[in-house]
Image: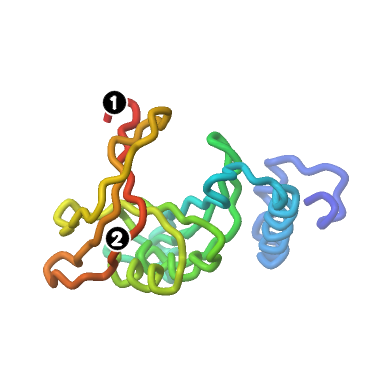
């Protein structure tokens, strides 16, 4: 930041006062450059040799003021933006943002993820906020790797039970299964591969 602004020193109070005068493109480019440098630094690392590259996908919502945030209207008394992020896992404790998409808060997580699942050599991990069977169907068909939680009412048919290694931690069951879309019962994926059930911290 000092290099880009030609300043010898930057104090947080000074930055706050001058924030409105700093071109947004400058901040954006600084952010993208930092992400590229971190990605380049870790690109040769293989933290999970048996799995390959692992990315966690999540979104964060940021509230905006009532008047100044009208352009990002979501509903009455709520204006917000969302940062849809794909984090590349370095190890069990650390990750860095590899790609992000900005939107208004009205854009759902399920819509934002369309721009984050782009690499077939990466396994993407989602929580329940990303349950959309149309996406699952497309990813399976096109060969993308992902791990996702499914709805409790999903119709899952176990095709084959697989042995769980004795040294496996937190895995209660390993199986191949086919899953039908709730309500329509339409089969969207057969032989999904390995289905894992985790029990962490006693949950």
User: Taking 131 as reference, is 15 above or below it?
Assistant: above
- Badge 2 marks a residue whose secondary structure is loop
Q: How many marks?
A: 2
- Of mark 2 and mark 1, the one earlier in the sequence is 2
Residue denoted by label 2: 131
In this view of the protein, which residue sits in the foreground, 123 or 83? 123
Residue 65 place in picture, x, y as percent: 43, 57
Q: Residue at x 37, y 62 (%)?
A: 109
Instruction: Report whether residue 62 is seen.
Output: no
Q: Tell me the distance, in whole angstroms, between the alpha carbons under discs 2 and 1.
A: 25 Å
Q: Residue at x 65, y 59 (%)?
A: 20
Residue 202's disc number: 1
Residue 141 place in picture, x, y as percent: 39, 73
Left or right for 48, reference 29: left
Residue 60's disc number: none
Q: Quadrant of residue 11?
A: top right
In this view of the protein, which residue sits in the foreground, 70 or 141? 141
Left or right for 8, reference 108: right
Q: Residue at x 42, y 57 (%)?
A: 146
Instruction: Report whether residue 32 is seen.
Output: yes
């Amino acid at each position: 930041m000092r290099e880009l602004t030609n300043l010898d020193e930057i104090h947080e109070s000074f930055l706050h006062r001058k924030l409105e005068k700093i071109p947004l493109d400058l901040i954006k480019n600084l952010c993208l450059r930092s992400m590229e440098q971190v990605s380049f630094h870790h690109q040769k690392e293989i933290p999970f040799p048996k799995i390959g590259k692992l990315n966690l996908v999540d979104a964060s919502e940021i509230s905006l003021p009532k008047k100044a945030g009208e352009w990002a209207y979501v509903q009455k008394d709520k204006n917000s933006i969302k940062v849809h992020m794909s984090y590349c896992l370095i190890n069990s404790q650390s990750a860095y943002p590899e790609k992000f998409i900005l939107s208004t808060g009205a854009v759902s997580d399920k819509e934002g993820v369309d721009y984050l699942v782009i690499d077939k050599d990466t396994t993407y991990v989602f929580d329940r906020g990303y349950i959309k069977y149309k996406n699952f169907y497309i990813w399976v068909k096109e060969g993308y790797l992902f791990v996702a939680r499914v709805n409790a009412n999903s119709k899952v048919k176990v095709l084959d039970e697989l042995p769980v290694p004795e040294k496996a931690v937190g895995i209660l069951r390993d199986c191949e299964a086919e899953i039908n879309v709730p309500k329509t019962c339409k089969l969207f994926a057969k032989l999904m591969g390995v289905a894992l059930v985790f029990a962490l911290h006693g949950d």
